[in-house]
Image (spheres, rainbow, N blue to C red):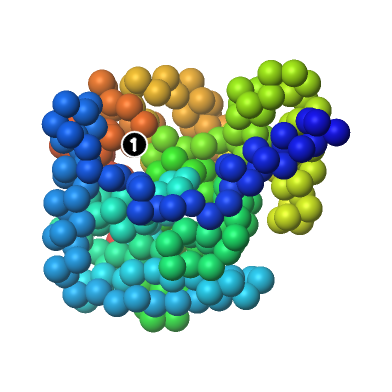
Amino acid sequence: MFEKIKANILFDHLLKRPDIDKAYAMVGPEDSWYDTITTVHNSLAQTRRLEHEDIQIKSDEGLRLQAVYYPNSSRKTMIWVHGYTSHAERESAFPALFYRSLGFNVLIPYLRAHGPSEGKYIAFGALEYRDIMRWVDRINEQIPDGEIVIHGLSMGGGIVLDLATQEMKNVKCLVSDAPSTSIEGFFRNVTKSFCKKNPDKAFAYATARFMKEFNVSALEFDRVHKITDAKYPLLLSSGSNEQMDDILNSIKTRCPTPTTVLILPGCNHGNGMYKQKQMYQTAIKTFLDQNLSL
């Protein structure tokens, strides 16, 4: 019983709606992330000066989901999928400016239980990939003959891997940065650190609660093995300090579609796009040139 109580506390702690205003809060010059976070804030100031509009859709369950859309008089659109507890507009601002420079419209959804989108719990991708498919439909209503790229980071990168196996009109390729590769693995790791005694029992309770809340098993989302059903070219990236080389290459080996792995030297989780800007952006541009016709 004690393990069940701890598992429920852990579930709420991990998956309840976060305070995203804390994401990317400014830090002092002595902080190792100071340069990156300064770039984030400067980029956000630039994007907010661009023409944009708030748009909404409904999830399969009727949740109101909101996004910010930056039109660019283009038939090409990039949809950004943000990370766990992230502020969507801040996280996406720097890459959004890059995609805009390449002539893309940019759509920045707030995932369920983040920001202005409704929802009590984050499902860590188990439901969010369906929400992104609804956003794909929304773009196709507006641009029926366009081309779509979906780009995600961290949890968003894992959602991109879930989307890789789905049929989506006008989606041409996917980019996944530092992806979370298993919801089960996420729960096992945090349960072990949170519950020193009987972590397996607490894990069982936590995943049972996951099934009850979302009507889907956390164990279904083994993205490394499911990638064998991928339908789109894929670019995978991570920082060298994350030591994800083996798992990304495993995905590449299993993936039936053209797959590129990019390891960014000297970088940590999510900061490669800033610290290795030229290498990162050159790789993405090459990948897009190979897979888009517009």
> Which image quarter: residue 142?
bottom left
- The residue depicted at 19 percent of the width and 66 percent of the height is 48
The answer to whether residue 30 of the structure is visible from this angle is yes
Quarter the C terminus occupies: bottom left
Q: Secondary structure at mark 1?
A: loop
Quarter the N terminus occupies: top right
Instruction: Please indicate whether residue 223 sits to the left or right of residue 51 in the image.
Output: right
The answer to whether residue 144 of the structure is visible from this angle is no
Q: Which residue, given by chain and number where applicable, does mark 1 sit on?
A: 270
* Nearer to us in this view, 241 or 122: 122
- The residue depicted at 32 percent of the width and 27 percent of the height is 268
x, y percent for residue 186: 60, 33
- The residue depicted at 28 percent of the width and 26 percent of the height is 267
> Which image quarter: residue 29?
top left
Residue 283 lies, with reference to residue 211, above or below; the image says above
Instruction: Please indicate whether residue 281 sits to the left or right of residue 185 in the image.
Output: left
Instruction: Please indicate whether residue 119 sits to the left or right of residue 188 in the image.
Output: left
x, y percent for residue 126: 63, 51
Q: Amino acid at mark 1?
A: Gly
- The residue depicted at 21 percent of the width and 28 percent of the height is 31
Tell which residue pokes out farthest to the right in this image: 1
Residue 225 lies, with reference to residue 30, above or below; the image says below
